Image: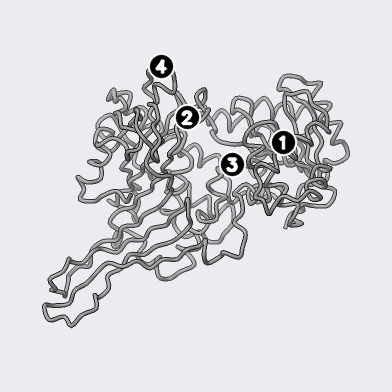
Amino acid sequence: MTEPSATFILFGATGDLAHRMIFPSLYNLMGDGLLPKDFLIVASGRSELDDAAFRRDIDKTLKEFLADDQYDREQAAKFAEMIIYCPVSVGNDAQFAALAERVKGREDKGLAIYLSTPPSLFAPTAEALQKAGLAGPKSRIAMEKPIGHDLPSSHEVNLAMAATFDEERIFRVDHYLGKETVQNLLALRFGNMLFEPLWNNTAIDHVQITVAETVGLEGRVSYYDGVGALKDMVQNHMLQLLALVAMEPPARIDATAVRDEKVKVLRCLRPMDAKSVLNHSVKGQYGPGAVKGEIVVGYADELGHESDTETFVALKAFVDNWRWKNVPFYIRTGKRLPNRQSEILIQFKEVPHSIFSGKGKGLEPNTLIIRLQPEENIRVLIMAKQPGLDRGGVELREVGLNVSLDAAFAKMRRRIAYERLILDLLVGDTTLFVRADEVEAAWSWIDSIHKGWAEAEMKPAKYAAGNWGPSSAIALIERDGASWHD
């Protein structure tokens, strides 16, 4: 195991993500004794603050975002002592030089650099780090999505980062990959003989992947409009879930083997065009409505003007390889939907012949439901005999076999996804991070959809907030004889 980096440099340290996720995660890692001795956190932002002022701010952050049983005054004081603050703005070489001076002599112990900044700052920050002598062989750099806004721009970002850092020292963050249940997909598939022999087009009818949000713009107006659901959610989170569901068994659980298999899936996604988007995609935008009993305004009202940006997207995708030939992957995501949930549904095919002739319902095909949030569980729907004397024939009923991961591991603390990702960054394990060719393969498919939408002049269909998207999203799956699992 590689010695963990002893210095963590965080750009964007005054931002929302840093306060909600990154600092609480570092605090928890310290409390569990998982940070190296002599660990230093260098917080950086554009604000002119001194160490004491920033430490007071972080103490307030921990009180606000940690669970009541996690915050400890003495631990928080110990954590604060690890933090120094250094104001840095991109384009100011003197400030980068001052940052380098504050970590002088620590370079050989490893620098883990985290960019919680707008993507436009990734490349110039990397260049400035190199100029300041902070991009040496023991430096690693992590950056939050999005990586570009299409294939050419993502390729440009990747080239710019590669000019300063080797690929194995670049950590592209998709926080979904840090979730325990997402990682459990690998354990479910490749740790159980029960599923893998059936995990193909001979036994599976279709796959559904849903990521639903009840919130609207929530302060993301400047970012979201012009980006939309396809780029914001499908290109990263949902395609990562699809890749984990569809990938071939890797030779081992390591960064190269796992990511090699994921990128193969993404390259097998069938591109769309102006004709196929009409039958295989739906774009929508929420209007006024009610969510959880609360009246909410529509997207255009929230934005302040009309827009063609989609807040909902549903897709019928195909992975054109031997295992998944002709198996549709139905994907949907949106804002202002009825419930907050993320789940994967594997719909198996019907048995080839029913030997039962009861008066009840017929045989239902088996279903595997993997719920990622808000609760974490795995549910298998199977057919069982209904109790009785069977005078009119054997009656069957669908019942659920439920495995609640929350209950099974109730005595173990459910970790923030960022705890795992930060720890992996510190030790240099890239398995749960996205490789350059993965990013570009995903963008290639997303770009084909955007191009198809533009050529077909598709506009977002309106749906009332609190509903499951436009009616065309229901038709997308029901014309194939299936239904969305709500």
Q: Nearer the viewer, mark 3 or mark 2?
A: 2
Question: Which label lies toward us, 3 or 1?
Answer: 1
Q: Spatial distance from mark 4 to mark 2, Cα to Cα?
A: 14 Å
Direction top: furthest residue: 305
Label 1 or label 2, whichever comes before in sequence order: 1
Instruction: Give the quadrant of residue 285.
Output: top left
**Viewer-side residue, 22 vs 99:** 22
Q: Earlier in the sequence, mark 4 or mark 2?
A: 2
Q: Secondary structure at mark 2?
A: loop
Residue, disc 2: 217
Q: Residue 30, relative to residue 365: is it above or below?
A: above
x then y, percent, for residue 12 = 68, 31
Q: Are marks 3 and 2 in contact (CB under 8 Å)?
A: no
Q: Are marks 3 and 4 in contact (CB under 8 Å)?
A: no
Q: Is residue 92 above or below residue 68?
A: above
Q: Amino acid at mark 3?
A: Val
As shown in the figure, which amino acid type bears the numbered disc 1? Leu
- The amino acid marked with disc number 4 is His
Q: Earlier in the sequence, mark 3 or mark 4?
A: 3
Question: Which residue carries the number 3 mark?
Answer: 173
Look at mark 4 in the image and give the residue it sits on: 305
